[in-house]
Structures are given as C-alpha cells and as structure tokens.
Amino acid sequence: MGKKKSAPAPAPAPPPAPVAVPTQSLQTQTALNEVSGAQSRLNMTLGAQLDQQNKDFFTTQDIRQTQATGAETRLTLGVQGEQDRASIGARGEQERLGYETQGAQQRLGYQTQGEQERLSIGSRGEQERLSIGATGEETRRTVLTQGEQERLNIGRRGQEERLGYETQGVQQRLGIGATGEETRKTVLTQGEQQRLGYQTQGEEERRGIRTTGQETRKSALQQYMQQNFVMNRQREWSQDAYRTGGPKTSRPGSSQPELVE
C-alpha cells in the first residue's frame, strides 16, 4: 500500500496588538503639574499686587519726604539769609569806621608832609640866595612857582584820593568787617610811623641843602678869586705894553695872550 501524505501544520497566530494601560504615576504627575502651575500663577499675581502696593506706598512716602525736605530747606535758607544780611551790615559798619580812621590818618600825614616840604623849600631858598647871588631873584621866583605848583598838586592829589576813597567806601561797605579793630590799630601805627618818617626826611633834606649851599659858596668864591686873578694879570700886561710903547701878544714864559689897548 502506498504512504499517505500528512496535512501541513497550521500557521502560528499573530501576536495581539499592544493596549495602552494608564498608570497611576502619570496621572499624579499631571495633576501635580497643574496644581503647581496654578499656584505659580497665583503667586505671581499676588506678588504683582504686592509690588504695586509697595510701589504706591513708597512713592507716597518719597513725595512726603521730598515735601518735608523742601520745607526744611526753605526754612534753613530763610534763616541763613537773615544771618548773612546781619553779617553784611556789621561788616559794612566796621569797614566804614576803618576807612574814616584811615582817612583821618592820611590827612594828618599829608599835613605833616606839607609842613616838612615847606620847611625844606624855605631852607633851600635861603641857601640858594646866599650861594648864587646874581641869580637870586630868578631862583626865588622858581622856588615860589615850584612851591605853588606842589601845593596845587598836593591839593589835587588829596581831592582825587578823597573821591577815590569815597567810591571805594561805597563799594566796600558790602564786604568783610571782623578785622575793623585791628585795621584801625594798624592804620594808627602806620600814621605815626609816616609822620616820623616825614620829619626825619625833612631834617635830612635840610642838612643836605645846608651842605650844598656851603659847597656852592666855596665854589663861587674860588671862581671869583680866579676871575680876579686873571683880570689883574691882563691889566698888568696891558699896562706893561702901554709903558713899553708897543703891543705884545704874550709875556715870556706864559701862554696867556696879552690884551692890546
């Protein structure tokens, strides 16, 4: 008998499709993320509200602080202005006193200087009149004119200086005054020293003028004696020439020419 063929084996069944199975951890994480996001949004909202409230509060405080500071500053400036005006008034009063004292001392100095100059001019005129002789009249006129011009210059100088000090006093009465007492003491000492200096200067000038007058008189006397000597020699030569009956141009042993009558 022949062999029977066996039936083919059936194909294996395909694997089942995968089915997604929800897990408890994924849901929990999702819920936590939602709660965390909501909480973060709430925190941000509350933080923004608090920031706005703080900003409004501090802005109001800054405005109040600025207003209080401005009021205090205005009060301080008002008090400072009153004190400055009081200081300027006191300073101006001290400076006016100082300039009055300075003007008085300067006027005394000019008076002393004028007296010394007049004494010096008088001594100079007296010595020159004794010295020059023939030119005495012109010298006296010159000295008188010089004294007149010097007095005019002194008067003009004093007038200009008084005008200058008046203008300076008007401008400087608004300045500094705590040193008024020291300035007056300094000006008094300066005036005394100036007067002493003018007196010393006048004495020295008069001594110099007397010495100059003595030297001038000595020179004039020597010149007069020299001229008389020359004139006598010329007269002798002329008389000799007349006696000898002829003119002579020179004497033996002399370089002086003879005068011819």
Image (cartoon, helix red, strand yellow):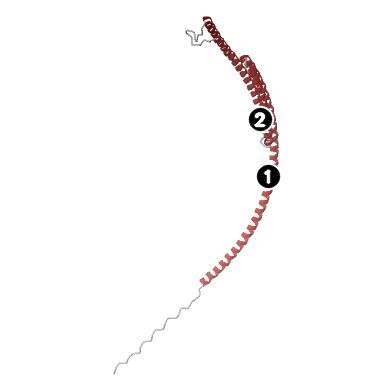
Q: Residues within 10 Å of mark 2 (few under 14, many from 20)?
A: some
Amino acid type assigned to the residue bearing label 2 in the image: Thr
Checking the image for residue 183, the label placed there is: 2
Say if residue 216 shows up in the picture: yes
- Which of these two is toward me, 189 or 202? 202
Say if residue 116 shows up in the picture: no
Question: Which quarter of the image is occupied by the N terminus?
Answer: bottom left
Residue 89 percent location from the top left of the image: 70, 37
Amino acid type assigned to the residue bearing label 1 in the image: Leu
Give the mark nearest the N terminus, 1 or 2.
Answer: 1
SS of the residue at dot 2?
Answer: helix
Placement of 183 over or under 258, stated as above or below = below
What residue appears at the point 61 percent right and 19 percent down from the top-left corner? Answer: 205
Residue 178 percent location from the top left of the image: 67, 34
Checking the image for residue 77, the label placed there is: 1
Placement of 95 over or under 210, stated as above or below = below
Q: Residues within 10 Å of mark 1 (few under 14, many from 20)?
A: few
What residue appears at the point 63 percent right and 60 percent down from the top-left corner? Answer: 52
Question: Which quarter of the image is occupied by the C terminus?
Answer: top right
Placement of 88 over or under 112, stated as above or below = below
Checking the image for residue 191, the label placed there is: none
Q: CA distance from mark 1 to mark 2?
A: 32 Å
The mark closer to the camera, 1 or 2, is: 2
- Asked where in the image residue 222 lies, by quadrant, the reply is top right
- Which of these two is toward me, 237 or 16? 237
Say whether residue 54 is left or right of residue 261: right
